[in-house]
Image (spheres, rainbow, N blue to C red):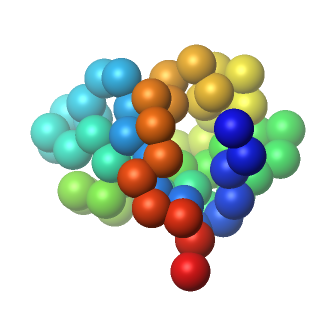
């Protein structure tokens, strides 16, 4: 699946704040994700991000 900056995705496990929704803010070798619940930002390798993402909720505007 193709992911772009601004997409909202759902992950397998919830963030400690309880939200499973993340906004993609950077795509490349690493993914930069911002939690839609508490706005915490994480940066993870692409391979790990692709494993943890279940589905895309909204496309970028």
Question: Within the image, what quadrant is residue 12 found in?
Answer: top left
Q: From what the image shows, is residue 61 above or below residue 8? A: below
On the rendered structure, is 21 left or right of 29? left
Q: Tell which of 41 and 50 is nearer to you.
A: 50
Residue name at image x 40 percent, y 53 percent: 57
Residue name at image x 58 percent, y 71 percent: 60
Quarter of the picture containing the N terminus is top right
Q: Where is residue 35 drawn, in percent x and y?
A: 36, 53
Q: From what the image shows, is residue 53 above or below residue 35? A: above
- Let me know if residue 34 appears in the view: no
Q: From what the image shows, is residue 1 above or below residue 2? A: above
Quarter of the picture containing the C terminus is bottom right
Residue name at image x 61 percent, y 42 percent: 43
Q: How many numbered marks, from 0 up?
A: 0
Q: Where is residue 51 drawn, in percent x and y?
A: 58, 19
Q: Where is residue 25 drawn, in percent x and y?
A: 61, 62
- Let me know if residue 15 appears in the view: yes
On the rendered structure, is 28 left or right of 13? right
Q: Where is residue 31 drawn, in percent x and y?
A: 68, 44
Most distant residue in the right direction = 29
Most distant residue in the bottom direction = 61
Residue name at image x 15 percent, y 39 percent: 18
């Amino acid at each position: 699946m193709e992911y772009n900056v601004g997409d909202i995705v759902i992950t397998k496990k919830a963030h400690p704040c309880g939200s499973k929704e993340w906004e993609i803010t950077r795509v490349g070798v690493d993914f930069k994700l911002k939690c839609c619940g508490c706005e915490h930002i994480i940066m993870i390798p692409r391979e790990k991000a692709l494993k943890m993402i279940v589905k895309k909720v909204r496309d970028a505007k």
